[in-house]
Image: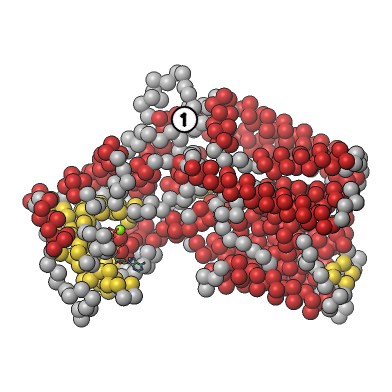
Amino acid sequence: MEAPPLLELKGVSKRFGAVQALTQVDFAVRAGEVMALVGDNGAGKSTLIKGIAGIYPFDEGETFFDGQRVTIHNPREATALGIEIVYQDLALADNLDVVANMFLGRETMQGIQLDEARMELAAIETLTSLSVSTLRSVRTPVAGLSGGQRQAIAIAKAVLWNSRLVILDEPTAALGVAQTRQVLNLVRNLAAKGLGVVIISHNLHDVFECADRITALRLGQKVREFITKETNQQEVVHAITAGALQYVPGMKES
Amino acid sequence: MTTNEAPLQSENALLESREQQTLGAYIQTYLQRVRAGALGPLPIIIGIVAVAIFFQSRNAAYLSPNNIVNLIMQMSGIALIAFGVVFVLLLGEIDLSVAYVSGVAGVIATILMRPPHNLEWYLTVPIALLAALGIGTLQGFLITTFQLPSFIVTLAGLLAWNGAILLLVGAGGTVGIPASPFREIANVYLPPELGLGFVVVLVVAYAATQFIQLQSRRAQGLNAKPITIIGIQIAILVVLAVGVVLIVNQDRGLPLIGAIVIVTLIVLTFITRNTRFGRYVFAVGGNKEAARRAGIRVERVRLYVFMLCSFMAGVGGIILASRLKSVSANQGGGQLLLNCISAAVIGGTSLFGGRGAVYSAVLGALLIAMVENGMVFLRLETGWQFIITGIVLVLAVIVDSLSQRSQKRSGLA
Ligand SMILES: Nc1ncnc2c1ncn2[C@@H]1O[C@H](COP(=O)(O)OP(=O)(O)OP(=O)(O)O)[C@@H](O)[C@H]1O
Ligand SMILES: [Mg+2]
């Protein structure tokens, strides 16, 4: 028997008023594997991961983590399961420094006091272990950092917290060549450490470079799942732009 | 941050933060931040010095021991209320009800002491503070539960609590506070030795915590403030604190309420800088969505801040009532609201949320008291005082806005 996937969604749907953002989507990620989530703008990629994160609940469908059925009501519950999300709009507090951001919501305490020294050491250690080498000081406010540095901090957070599943929403969208390479290396490092990784990207070149499998969404529906080694960019592009839809858009299946 | 003995550091720039910072590097970093717009208390300190020089040059009695005691008395009520305003501003919110909430507290503490209630002050004062806390809870509940703008809810509060005061006191009325420690609290001065002892203990405690922190950071291989800087800061503190106490001791001595302001300043500063709650206040003010995604109970943090703000307004209200030894139907009215909010802003707390410090309440209140007091000294009409305070406020907001923009540009904010 194969071990159950780390995370599995079965038949999840999400509607925003008149917009049916997701329809009956099945999705699975295994530990030690990078799963890419691709699809056009508005295909529902961000909606899918926000549902996993507990930002808003799915309207229907089931979620399994480690083979156990779970319901994730809020980000705290997702975190408790070991799910760490690196959002498209990074979600860092610009006025706080690197250390404060990495520990936000999970501060190390010493009695009623923040244990700043311990947090600072752990932050430095984690960033160093990921070879994040361009950061000058962990005490600068994150507003002053480059896109790649901010991305690295968000990813380092996942390592710091021993997460089991890391989800990255377009981590390389705003990055130059060298920084993209660094982030993709980080992503492979995460999987090599045995974590499950989901990466959303519009850049198929990046996807083929780092993903083991690819799930293609179109108009809120899953059109296909690929194994990267057994497919090519044309096939994936075709699925994204013209993949067969199972459900008529706008109609709700009963 | 340059380093000359650094074959190791060149491999990983992050390790630089483990190396001890030199004095020059520290000052350089500081100047860089100031140039980028992270001004800290610099503008307000310049303002205070300028105002002091201006009035002192017009009337040599302005900085006399007697008048310095007056200034401390005058700023205390405003500072206590402005403490709460700082927290609300850090969230990026506003509380327009603080002045009348302070009035409600003063009125309740007074009225309950008088017939037909005849309660003791040690009951009426806590009851009044609880009432203020209750008001904050109610307003905070409305704001967080129904997602209403704090501006509107506290504007409604401003009207409602003004009405409550009118009903309790009776239009046009004035009610004296019966003889009690409550009546006297704002008119008590620490004996010279006690006042001196008070600041000496504080300065020593400050120095001790600084050095303990320095030791512990060094022991863990983290970089720390250069010892010269710590020394200079302590020296400035000693000169200021001991100097002021020695001066006021030539007159009536350090007012008890001045000491209360200082203790509150220390406690609230600790909360903002060293506790989880304080960190969350900054996080929510900086990026509410990021805070929410980090699992922070954002609405709870906001509720607590509105509770804290009204509570501090209550404390200030007790002091203000005591200063006049009576409460009137106009309690909490007049310039009080604008003075308290201006104090926080003038002191350097940003209106845009996420940036500021508790001390800005004290520095801002001091500047406002200095202008108010100086006007009386020069026998200028009250009209001028309002105009000047208004100008100072606009200047402060301009500084805030400019520094915000330049910090954005250089990526510090
Ligand atoms: N909070 C919301 N309220 C209303 N509609 C929403 C909301 N979030 C997403 N949508 C809609 O749901 C659909 C899917 O959006 P989603 O953000 O998931 O797309 P995406 O695949 O992440 O696109 P992109 O590649 O542009 O990031 C879109 O039509 C979008 O307009
Ligand atoms: Mg998206």
- Choose top left, top right, bottom left or bottom right for residue A80: bottom left
User: Does residue B205 lie above or below B317 as drawn?
Assistant: above
Instruction: Indicate left or right for B54 with A92 as reference.
Output: right
Instruction: Indicate left or right for B335 with B404 as reference.
Output: right
Give the labeled residue for mark 1.
B18
The local secondary structure at tag 1 comes to: helix
Q: Which amino acid does the dot numbered 1 rest on?
A: Arg
**Residue B253 appears in view:** no
Q: Position of residue B266 (x, y in %)?
A: 68, 47
Residue beneath the point at 36% across and 26% down: B11
Residue beneath the point at 67% across and 72% down: B157
Residue beneath the point at 57% across and 41% down: B38
- Choose top left, top right, bottom left or bottom right for residue B232: top right
Q: Residues within 10 Å of mark 1 (few under 14, many from 20)?
A: some
Instruction: Indicate left or right for A12 with A128 as reference.
Output: left
B333 and B199: which one is in front? B333
Residue farthest to the top, as pictured: B5
B29 and B58: which one is in front? B58
B9 and A68: which one is in front? B9
Instruction: Indicate left or right for B185 with B145 as reference.
Output: right
User: Does residue B219 lie above or below B191 as drawn?
Assistant: above
Q: Chain of mark 1?
A: B
